[in-house]
Amino acid sequence: MPLRIVVGAQYRDAALSVYIKVAALAMRPEGCTAKVSVLAEYLGLSKSVTERGLKDLAHPDERDGLVEVVTTRRTLRGGRGQSAHRIVRTAAPGEYFVWVPVRAADALSPRLLRLYALIAYAEARNVPLAVGDLGGMLYHHTGKKAGQHLGDRQAARLIEELAATGWITVHARQGLQGRHAYETHRHPLQPVQLESTAPDIHDGSGADDHAGSLASREDQRTDRLVKRTGVGGGIRRRRPTGSRGPGHGEKRSNTSGPQTAQERGDLTRRAWEVLEPVRHELPAVRPFLLRRIDAEIGRQLAAGAGTERLTARLTARWASTEDPRRGDVGRWILGAGLVRRGCRLDGCESGTTWHTGERCHLCADIAATKRQAAEEQMPAAAPPPRPPAPVRPPATWLPWPPPPPDPGPEPTPDEREQLRAAATPAAVRQALADLGAAAAIDLYGRALVLPHLATDQHDEGTSRAEAQ
């Protein structure tokens, strides 16, 4: 939105709301072709207020002569008027502007929307704000004080009202030099109730001498045809009580009144768009439930849910539900179809972040916490059984070797000299076999015994003898 519309005193507050809605619809290839009554219904304003705001935008500005909304009249060959074609002015290079979400125009009143735009621009440019600064950029447009600035008390009251809607957050005394710090949001932090507006059939986009719009038919590419009894909210009619014919005692019912929900005006245009997946089931829903459904849809749209999100939610749940919806479709829509499921985050839609399509991190943390708590409450699992020990084969006991033969008394040195002198090879071998290598060497000496050692036993005996 151009900043000149936000700060310009020559533009009414309603001009901001009308500009945002026209600019959003003009982004389509065919431009904005909605009637003024449709724009008023989208914005929740009366038709006369919408006409006045559109008049400020469609006429040259008294200060610089700029036209913000270019309007082109359209008429068929037969002379029947069509809804006008509207586009917004292309911004000049280097022109100051401010980003404002379209849903804010639907949820906020024109004056609160102007205050929101001022705070959003100041936040983007990092400009400190005081209550007096905001009051100096808001004006009286009617009454004896028309054209004058709002006072500090009025500006403070509007700031509190805007903060209560959830579109901004006021951080008290946290700004520069003890000022309040303001933080804007792209969607409200809590649901906002729509204000009920009475229909107004005065004024129009035509000439000033007779007022009224020149259009008698709306382009069907813009919106679906909805026959309603008023703009901005349906007018409740008296129920037909019937009449008694003259001379007859029976009571005759009056069937000339509206018979369908579309004709009665139980649902607004936005509700019809949301309920597109279940439109074929709506004729069987009672009017009382239809009005409750319409109120619930309006509440969620004002909170920033969006038409596409509600339609997608209803489509998915209608496709996955069978038994509960067969009893009463109206109660199913209120109790299951339109109810948002997920965590406390506004963007969470059944565990998924709606704008990104990714899994909601808060829902993932909650699920992990619940899973951990459930695991802690479960009894501790018994340890797995240990495998059995391998079976060892029974031990085999070998017989103890017999004791060595007794060599008898040890010979004296003289007897040992005699044995060595009379020793023969056969006697030495016989001594090795009977007594072992050590005893044979002890008897006959190393020189006589070593030539006859030929086995390991004899070698072992030899080593022992050497060690001795």
Image (spheres, rainbow, N blue to C red):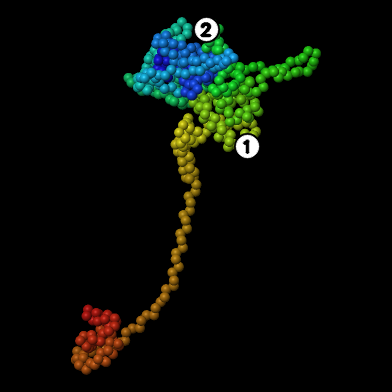
In the rendered view, would you say 397 is above or below 377?
Answer: below
Which residue is located at x 46 percent, y 15 percent? 70
Residue at mark 2: 208
Callout 2–callout 1 Cβ contact below 8 Å = no
The residue drawn where x is 63% and y is 21% is: 263
The answer to whether residue 83 of the structure is visible from this angle is yes
Residue 4, image x and y in percent?
Answer: 40, 15
Q: Which residue is located at x 48 percent, y 42 percent?
A: 371
Residue 81: % across, % down: 56, 14
Residue type for callout 1? Asp
Query: Looking at the rendering, which quadrant does residue 186 occupy?
Result: top left
Q: Position of residue 242 (x, y in %)?
A: 72, 17
The amino acid on which the numbered mark 2 sits, given as a three-letter code, is: Asp
- Label 1 neighbour load within 10 Å: few <14, some 14-19, many 20+: few
Quarter of the picture containing the N terminus is top left
Q: Is residue 153 above or below residue 317?
A: above
Q: Position of residue 423 (x, y in %)?
A: 23, 92
Q: Is residue 415 visible?
A: no
Badge 2: few (under 14), some or many (20 or more) residues near its Cα, within 10 Å? few
Q: Residue 78 versus residue 424: which sits nearer the camera? A: 78
Sequence-first tag of 2 and 1: 2
Q: Quadrant of residue 64?
A: top left
Residue at 76% in and 18% down: 251
- Determine whether, in the image, residue 148 is placed left or right of residue 44: left
Residue 323: numbered disc: 1
